[in-house]
Structure formats: structure tokens, C-alpha cells
Image (cartoon, grey):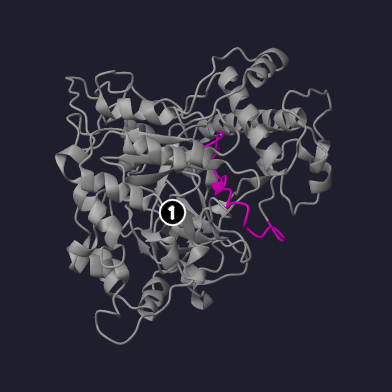
């Protein structure tokens, strides 16, 4: 098994007892005893008073805290919300010199790049489900009627009346993420707070040096100049052109990682070019700051694609074209956590359009070695490293530069261990990503500053265009129990049409992706036209506003 994620439907936070310190959450102990958190990528900003107060609360007190915040929302309007959030996003970009003129969040890719995406997705799903007909086998079978315009049915349109559980689950005024329940028949007075909302919201991974001693020692050694990776690039422009700069050390490391990636074989490239009329050049996984991220390999994306990003240690301060976390760290995209039925649980959606290849957010939690993961925690973890699958990566890491001897030895030692990011008690939005047999988000590993497992950030990237209201999903991996999957996609292994899907060829799956995407785009453009007619002259509020019963 290479990646493991739970269904995120029955997450519980265990109450801690006995000593006063044990009654505090894990993260609060990190706040009080800063030296316990050795993560080199932690935020420099101070924790807010609201976050500190939350971290002091025991489990039952947290439930009561949220219970007191539960309210009924009236007159919710999806289209008005979409318009307001889209305009606020545009304003943020226009006011930011590091974004304005560099990035357009409404820009669609050209058709050739879309075709290449559908090819990779079809190849992935084709092999994942055990299909072994060759990608170069071509047929003219039509897309089954049941799968036509399928994704449009997966977008959630919230009702006029909603239960708002939390106005801001992050407790950070700079980045508000509300939580809603849209299950019919619920009322604030009898609403029960789910245990899955009692976690500590964190923006960066945490690493406890008391339990992960070897990794913590590696982080200390990584602070030595010989063991740090940073560039000396500078520019008078708002964004330093590090990417494609042969003098940039971070870009040089990026190129070294790209050698690990699998690309199209000659026959596959010929097939894609001649039979489906794609003339785009062959490329590998790229991690430029503003260009859409492209996964050329349709198979093992997680272990075949690794990147390196500039950071605040560099002369460019990470404000450059070689930092895929640049937009993520600005918290640009609006999100909400919601649920539409008890069985499926909480999901994530955004009220704005998110193009394919967009870095969305980071998956955060506690970095824990596999041997220290209890059974109830393993299902909540995302694998970070693998001794077997990362064998080639380890060889590259050891030869990147002239490390100190002790650092090189500890990298070898760590390469034989398997680490996870555990989000059960501490995490962010990523912990409520739902499973899908045909996901719209992929996870990729990006290093910053150095090369220990603690220097890896798990980046979540959109595989396809994600339209407003669509739940963000990932593939939980081969170990996920699919006996009762509710993803609802055309490829759902528990769906009513799976037997028909099993018989579909590679090229039919390709056409299915392309046709569904075309219907989604048409629906979205029509929706935008209606929204413009209704709300073009409406003033834009400074922040999202819910109509609450007085």
C-alpha cells in the first residue's frame, strides 16, 4: 500500500485525562513548549488568542464551545455567494503586486493540454481497475448514455436554510473557513456536534522531537549551511524569475527530481498525437509558481512526481517562479466545510471556479513514523515516505550536494523508515477530503529548504477544472474499503453502472472524461451569464455574510 486515507466519516478525538498538562491538546503543548515542535516549515506568525483558548479546552468543553455557535442560516443564495466570492478573489489578486499580471484564476487551458490531462486520467483509471488492454488500442465505441453529463450531478447546491456550525473553524481572522450542515430536518436546538470537528487546526505540519528523535536530529543538522538548499537569485521585479534560471540552486534541484519521473513511451506519445489529434510537446511534471501543474504520467503520480520549491531562506524569499506554495500561503481561495448526509459526512467545496493544475492547499498533520501509528490513527494518515518506493529518490537526495557526513548518514537511516502525516487530532481542510474512484485532486510531495521527511510538504493539486459547489476529492488508495463507496462518479466501484464501466475501453474512458468536462464547462458559463445579469451592479461585501435569525 502506498497511500492510506480514511473515509473521514467517523473521526473521533480522544479525551485526555489525569495531569493538567495531559488535559491540554497536543498542539497546545507545542505552543507552550515551543522546543517540542521541530518542524522547519512551521509558520512564523503567532497563534491567535482564539486559537490559544481553543487549545486549552478539553474535549467536552470544545463540544460546548461549538454548540453555542450553532445557528440557523436563512435565505442562503448560491449564485449570489458565487458572485461575491469571485469578485473578492479578483480584488485580492488586483491588490497584490505578486499576483496581479502574473495569474488569472478564470483562465481555461488550451484544448491540447486538456486532451493530455484526459489521456493521463484515462490511463490511470484504466490501470487502477485492472484493465490491461493497451493504451494504443483504439475503438469508436460511444460514451454510454448513463455517463453523459455525470459530473454535473455531483455539484452541491446548498439549500436556502442551512445550519452553520462554525463561522470559522480555523479561529484565524486572516483565513475564515465556515462549517455547515445541509441535512434536512436539523435545527440548532437539537443539533449534536460531531467529534470530527474537535481537531486542532494547523497550517503546517508539527513534529514532536520527544517521540521522533531521529527525525528531529536530522532537522537540527539540516540547519547547517552545507545541509541547507537555497538560492541567491534576486530581482527588482515583484516575482524573481527562478524557474528556468540555470543559476538558481532550487531550480537545479527541481531538475534533478524530474529525472525520476516517467514520461510517455514512444508508442503512447504517437498514439496520443495521431489518433486523438494532440500536437502538444511531451513534458514531465512541472512545478512553476503560476503555470498549471501537469501530471504527464497516468500511473503512480505520488511517488513518480517530486518537486523542490524556493523558500524564505532564499534571496528571493520564495517570491519567485519556482515556488508552488506561493499562492497557497496567501490563503486566496475561499472554501467551506459542509455535509449533505450523515453517512457521507463532511466534505470540502469552493464557491469559485478552480482551473485544472491549480495548487489548492497543503495537507497538514503530525509527522509520525509508521511504527508509532496506532490502528485507529493509521486510517487518518497520508503516507509521506516509503523505503521501497523511494529507493531512487533516496539515491538522488544523497548525491544532490556535499552534505556533512553526519547528515548524509542520518538521511540513509531515515530512508529505511516509513513516515506519515497524521491528521486525526491536528490538521487542516485536507482531513475532510472525501474519497472518489475518479478524484479531482492529486497529492504531490514538494521539498523546501532541505531533504529530510520533515522538509516535505504534501501539496494538493486539481487534476481537472473544479466548478463551484463541487466536492474536492482524492483517491484514498487500494486499501480503502469500497463495498459501500458513495463517490457517485461514473467510475464508482459501488455505483449502479459499474458493470457497464468495467467493459469500457481505454479510449472510451478518455472520451467520457472529455464529454463530461465539456458539459461542465457549458453549464458553468451559462451560470456565470445568469449571475452577471442578476448581480453585476450589486455592491461587494468585504467578507462573506450569512443571514441569521435575530
Q: Does the magenta stretch include residue 463?
A: yes
Instruction: Check the image and report above or below for 392 versus 183.
Output: above
**Is residue 288 visible to us here?**
no
Give the residue number, with chain letter if any, for mark 1. 429
Q: Nearer the viewer, residue 174 or 79?
A: 174
Q: Where is residue 174 in the image (x, y as percent from the top left)?
A: 28, 50
The image shows a total of numbered marks equal to 1
**Is residue 118 visible to us here?**
yes
Q: Position of residue 83 (x, y in %)?
A: 47, 38
Q: Does the magenta stretch include residue 535?
A: no
Q: Which residue is drawn at 26% across and 57% down?
A: 216
Image quadrant where residue 170 sits: bottom left
Instruction: Check the image and report above or below for 194 versus 140.
Output: below
Q: Which residue is drawn at 66% across and 21% down?
A: 268
Dividing the image into 4 quarters, which one contains the C terminus?
Answer: bottom left
Could you tell me which secondary element the residue under label 1 belongs to?
Answer: helix
Q: Give the range drawn in magenta.
A: 462-485
Q: Where is residue 531 in the image (x, y as percent from the top left)?
A: 53, 34
Q: Position of residue 365 (x, y in %)?
A: 38, 58
Amino acid at each position: 500500500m502506498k497511500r492510506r486515507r480514511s473515509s473521514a466519516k467517523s473521526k473521533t478525538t480522544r479525551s485526555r485525562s489525569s495531569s493538567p498538562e495531559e488535559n491540554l491538546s497536543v498542539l497546545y503543548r507545542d505552543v507552550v513548549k515551543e522546543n517540542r515542535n521541530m518542524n522547519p516549515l512551521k509558520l512564523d506568525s503567532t497563534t491567535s488568542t482564539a486559537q490559544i483558548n481553543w487549545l486549552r479546552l478539553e474535549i467536552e468543553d470544545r463540544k460546548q464551545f461549538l454548540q453555542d455557535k450553532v445557528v440557523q442560516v436563512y435565505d442562503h443564495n448560491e449564485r449570489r455567494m458565487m458572485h461575491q466570492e469571485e469578485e473578492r478573489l479578483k480584488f485580492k489578486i488586483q491588490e497584490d503586486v505578486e499576483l496581479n499580471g502574473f495569474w488569472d484564476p478564470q483562465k481555461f487551458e488550451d484544448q491540447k493540454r486538456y486532451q493530455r490531462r484526459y489521456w493521463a486520467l484515462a490511463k490511470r483509471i484504466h490501470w487502477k481497475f485492472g484493465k490491461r488492454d493497451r493504451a494504443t488500442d483504439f475503438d469508436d465505441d460511444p460514451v454510454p448514455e448513463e455517463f453523459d453529463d455525470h459530473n454535473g450531478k455531483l455539484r452541491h447546491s446548498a439549500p436556502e436554510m442551512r445550519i452553520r456550525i462554525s463561522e470559522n473553524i480555523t479561529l484565524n481572522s486572516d483565513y475564515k473557513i465556515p462549517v455547515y450542515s445541509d441535512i434536512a430536518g436539523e435545527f440548532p436546538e437539537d443539533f449534536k456536534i460531531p467529534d470530527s470537528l474537535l481537531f486542532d487546526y494547523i497550517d503546517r505540519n508539527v513534529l514532536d522531537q520527544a517521540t521522533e528523535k531521529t527525525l528531529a536530529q536530522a532537522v537540527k543538522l539540516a540547519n547547517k549551511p552545507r545541509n541547507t538548499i537555497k538560492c541567491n537569485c534576486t530581482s527588482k521585479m515583484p516575482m524573481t524569475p527562478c524557474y528556468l534560471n540555470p543559476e538558481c540552486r532550487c531550480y537545479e534541484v527541481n531538475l534533478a527530481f524530474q529525472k525520476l519521473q516517467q514520461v510517455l513511451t514512444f508508442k503512447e506519445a504517437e498514439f496520443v498525437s495521431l489518433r486523438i489529434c494532440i500536437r502538444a510537446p511531451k513534458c514531465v511534471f512541472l512545478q512553476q509558481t503560476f503555470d498549471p501543474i501537469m501530471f504527464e504520467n497516468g500511473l503512480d503520480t505520488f511517488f513518480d512526481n517530486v518537486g523542490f520549491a524556493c523558500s524564505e531562506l532564499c534571496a528571493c524569499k520564495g517570491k519567485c517562479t519556482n515556488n508552488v506554495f506561493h499562492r497557497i500561503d496567501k490563503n486566496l481561495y475561499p472554501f467551506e466545510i459542509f455535509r449533505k448526509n450523515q453517512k457521507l459526512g463532511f466534505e470540502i467545496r469552493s464557491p469559485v471556479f478552480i482551473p485544472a493544475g491549480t495548487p489548492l492547499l497543503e495537507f497538514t498533520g503530525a509527522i509520525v513514523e509508521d511504527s508509532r501509528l496506532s490502528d485507529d490513527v493509521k486510517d487518518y494518515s497520508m503516507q509521506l515516505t516509503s523505503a521501497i518506493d523511494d529507493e531512487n529518490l533516496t539515491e538522488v537526495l544523497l548525491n544532490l550536494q556535499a552534505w556533512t557526513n553526519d547528515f548524509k548518514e542520518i538521511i540513509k537511516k531515515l530512508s529505511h523508515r516509513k513516515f506519515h502525516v497524521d491528521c486525526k487530532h491536528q490538521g487542516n481542510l485536507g482531513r475532510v477530503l472525501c474519497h472518489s474512484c475518479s478524484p479531482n485532486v492529486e497529492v504531490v510531495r514538494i521539498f523546501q529548504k532541505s531533504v529530510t521527511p520533515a522538509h516535505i510538504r504534501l501539496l494538493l493539486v486539481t487534476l481537472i477544472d473544479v466548478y463551484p459547489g463541487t466536492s474536492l476529492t482524492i483517491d484514498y488508495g487500494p486499501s480503502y474499503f469500497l463495498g459501500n463507496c458513495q463517490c457517485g462518479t461514473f467510475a464508482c466501484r459501488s455505483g449502479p453502472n459499474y458493470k457497464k464501466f468495467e467493459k469500457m475501453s481505454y479510449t472510451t474512458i478518455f472520451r467520457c472524461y472529455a464529454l463530461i468536462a465539456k458539459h461542465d464547462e457549458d453549464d458553468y458559463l451559462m451560470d456565470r451569464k445568469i449571475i452577471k445579469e442578476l448581480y453585476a451592479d450589486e455592491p461587494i461585501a468585504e467578507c462573506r455574510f450569512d443571514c441569521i435569525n435575530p
